[in-house]
């Protein structure tokens, strides 16, 4: 079980007790082996998160401290890749336990039925406030329209087999968007459903701005639909301009002088804006290529506690 943690000092004492109780329960019921482990990944927290994690005295708790804040996705990558080939299956879930930990036993059941990926799907998001729920819904639909394969209402609560992990590690992209990578892997998979719980303590590390940029990152990492869209707008503008030109020519031939400072200026501004917009979209992709070609490490580990 892998838990990414970023500035979670408020959450950890309470969450970790719940996690340990549940985990020990799974071992007692022989659902998982006693060789199983929990791993907390401290994603460059600035509060006491690492202090709390490193002091945990349980024989089954591992911990990774990243050198700075790399973001949720890369924290998961750090946890998964560090322990690749050491376990049969891996579960990732949020340390605030908004992803209902009680569902993990169902995930393991599905894994034992030979599923390589088990997606945790939110059947009920009433705990998220209206705006977050709606924007999330719009994004899932947008992904679908743009041909990005994702599992509706699934975030990063999932179980993956070691085989799925090996495949995942072949995806070398800098801009990680895990929820679209795993569906791209394929393999036998299924869903389990859970009610998304409320964050009891601390606050969300995903404010609107970060959420929007994450969604945009997902789109531009998996789809060229925005590029096609500007191509379409460009073509449409050409068609309209030919129509307008024809109309203006006819008026000229008929001897109707066309006054038109406003229309001219409006058109100049409109097309100026359109071109800048198109360049901006292309620039987003070029920027991504630029960063990807550098092939920089996606995370850096400062310290590991392995048991
Ligand atoms: N998280 C992280 N790095 C970050 C932001 C968040 O590791 O840069 C972790 C965080 O500690 C939590 C999980 O990712 O375990 C989900 O974050 P959060 O609960 O703030 O997001 P929300 O549930 O509000 O979408
Ligand atoms: Mg949360």
Image (cartoon, helix red, strand yellow):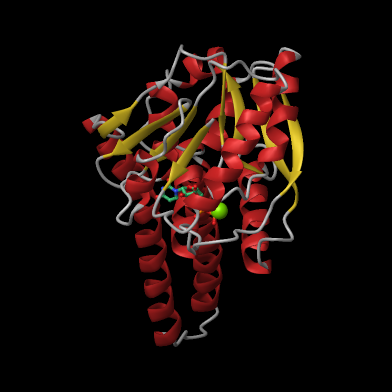
Position above or below: 85 against 72: above
**Left or right position of 41 against 87:** left
- Quarter of image, res 25: top right
Q: Nearer the viewer, residue 125 or 11?
A: 11
Q: Nearer the viewer, residue 276 or 93?
A: 93
Position above or below: 226 against 159: below
Residue at screen point 47% across, 84% down = 258
Q: Nearer the viewer, residue 275 or 128?
A: 128
Evaluate whether residue 148 shows in this view: no
- Quarter of image, res 251: bottom right
- Count of marks overlaid on the render: 0
Q: Which residue, as the protein is rendered here, is positioned at the far front?
A: 57
Residue at screen point 44% across, 46% down = 217
**Where residue 239 sits in the image (x, y, percent)?**
54, 56
Residue at screen point 43% across, 73% down = 267
Residue at screen point 70% across, 27% down = 107
**Where residue 271 sits in the image (x, y, percent)?**
40, 66
Quarter of the image where the C terminus is located = top left
Evaluate whether residue 32 shows in this view: yes
Position above or below: 227 against 273: above
**Where residue 146 sits in the image (x, y, percent)?**
60, 42
**Where residue 41 sits in the image (x, y, percent)?**
40, 38
Quarter of the image where the N terminus is located = top right
Q: Nearer the viewer, residue 291 or 114?
A: 114
């Amino acid at each position: 079980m892998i838990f990414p943690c970023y500035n979670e000092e408020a959450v950890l004492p309470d969450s970790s007790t719940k996690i340990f109780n549940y985990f020990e329960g799974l071992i007692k019921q022989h659902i998982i082996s006693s060789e199983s482990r929990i791993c907390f990944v401290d994603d460059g927290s600035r509060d006491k998160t690492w202090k709390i994690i490193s002091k945990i005295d349980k024989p089954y708790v591992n911990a990774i401290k990243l050198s700075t804040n790399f973001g949720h996705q890369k924290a998961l990558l750090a946890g998964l890749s560090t322990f690749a080939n050491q376990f049969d299956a891996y579960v990732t879930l949020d340390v605030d336990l908004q992803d209902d930990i009680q569902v993990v036993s169902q995930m393991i059941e599905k894994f034992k039925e030979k599923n390589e990926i088990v997606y945790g799907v939110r059947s009920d998001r009433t705990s998220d406030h209206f705006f977050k729920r709606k924007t999330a819904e719009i994004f899932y639909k947008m992904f679908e329209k743009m041909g990005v394969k994702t599992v509706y209402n699934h975030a990063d609560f999932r179980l993956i087999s070691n085989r799925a992990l090996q495949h995942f590690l072949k995806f070398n992209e800098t801009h990680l968007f895990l929820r679209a990578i795993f569906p791209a892997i394929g393999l036998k998979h299924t869903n389990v459903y859970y009610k998304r719980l409320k964050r009891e303590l601390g606050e969300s590390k995903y404010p609107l701005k970060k959420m929007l940029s994450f969604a945009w990152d997902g789109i531009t990492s998996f789809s060229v639909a925005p590029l096609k869209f500007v191509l379409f707008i460009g073509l449409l503008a050409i068609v309209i301009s030919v129509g307008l030109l024809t109309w203006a020519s006819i008026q000229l031939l008929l001897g109707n002088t066309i006054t038109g400072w406003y229309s001219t200026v409006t058109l100049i501004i409109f097309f100026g804006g359109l071109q800048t917009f198109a360049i901006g979209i292309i620039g987003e992709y070029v920027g991504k290529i630029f960063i990807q070609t550098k092939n920089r490490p996606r995370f850096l580990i400062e310290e590991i506690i392995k048991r």
